[in-house]
Amino acid sequence: MTQTGPQPRISSTGPQPRIPGPRGEYVSAFDRLDPLADEPDLFDPGARRPPHDPYAAVTDFRHELSEDEAPAAAPVQPDPPRKKAKGLTFTGIAAAAVTTVLAVVVAGQVADGREQDPQTQAADAQGGERGDASEASRSDARQAPAEQQPLSYEQKMAQKAVLPPKQASGDFEAVGGLDKAPGTGQKFRYRVDVEKGLGLDGALFAEAVQKTLNDERSWAHKGARTFERISSGKADFVITLASRGTTATWCAKSGLDTTQDNVSCDSAATDRVMINADRWAQGAETYGAAIFAYRQMLINHEVGHRLGFNHVSCSVDGGLAPVMQQQTKFLDHDGIKCKANPWVYPNS
């Protein structure tokens, strides 16, 4: 094999026998980790490698260096060790790399404020490999919140509402739509008005009026009457949901005082049947929590006045109060105890 590397220089005054240079394998074992560094050759202290051009890879890609010009190549991936000295070198490099990785891992754990035992680290490593799969499984295990179903008519009617203002705007707005009369008896056409600014559900109020009046237990009993709700045109009467102040104003037009007991009225001198919004929202002590039944009684009682019926009280102890009894004010009278009743014909 011809030695191509620099030869050792021997001081002499005469011809000397040529001493062979070191083997290439032995020299490569002492190559630096960075072969591009500007360091003197180990066997030729007087010689230096040419300066390294960091941009040569992209600026000199068409020029091929001669064998003498080419610097020593940097090892990209070390070959398996063949010599003991070279194996020791690579072992040292690997140990340094492992030490660096462990230092980074420990620093990361300290930054997270926790230290992990080997089992936890192994579990984390396994979880890191699975990554998205474990997250997806945890996500799938969680159930999405059930979509809230809208309340039914019965549920809404069974709930008390927030007390409206004592005095609202005084202006009325008709609830839109048409509810056809379901029966064949004497037809009454009515409109539902709601005072602006009450903050109550006007559509629920209109639905309650139509269903209550046309119930078999109400004034439509046995087909005697039928009721149709309109929103425009000529109405026989107007059922009006209004604040206590506006209710008192309209009832006073017919000589009725509703302020003492905060009640409703049929303002017979006008076309309005006035339903006190306080009572509609909160009920009365006589009915307690039974707000659904109280609202039905309130509609039947005031429309009964519009149909020509006057007040009457129960006469049998323990019996049902007639719908035309002033049940908002009392159930018991003159030693007779009465039961709350919202219907004209409760036994139907």
Image (cartoon, helix red, strand yellow):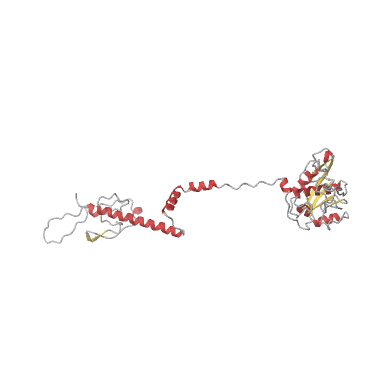
Camera sees residue 249: yes
From the viewer's perspective, is 307 left or right of 142? right
Q: What residue appears at the point 53 percent right and 48 percent down from the top-left corner? A: 139
Q: What residue appears at the point 52 percent right and 48 percent down from the top-left corner? A: 138
Q: Residue furthest left?
A: 14
In which quarter of the view is residue 221 placed? top right
x, y percentage for residue 4? Answer: 21, 52
**Relative to the observer, which residue lies in front, 337 or 173?**
337
Quarter occupied by the C terminus = top right
x, y percentage for residue 83? Answer: 24, 51
x, y percentage for residue 317? Answer: 84, 48
Camera sees residue 68: no
x, y percentage for residue 180? Answer: 79, 41
**Relative to the observer, which residue lies in front, 238 or 64?**
238
**Relative to the observer, which residue lies in front, 8 or 65?**
8
From the viewer's perspective, is 120 left or right of 57? right
**Relative to the observer, which residue lies in front, 15 or 210?**
210
Q: How many marks?
A: 0
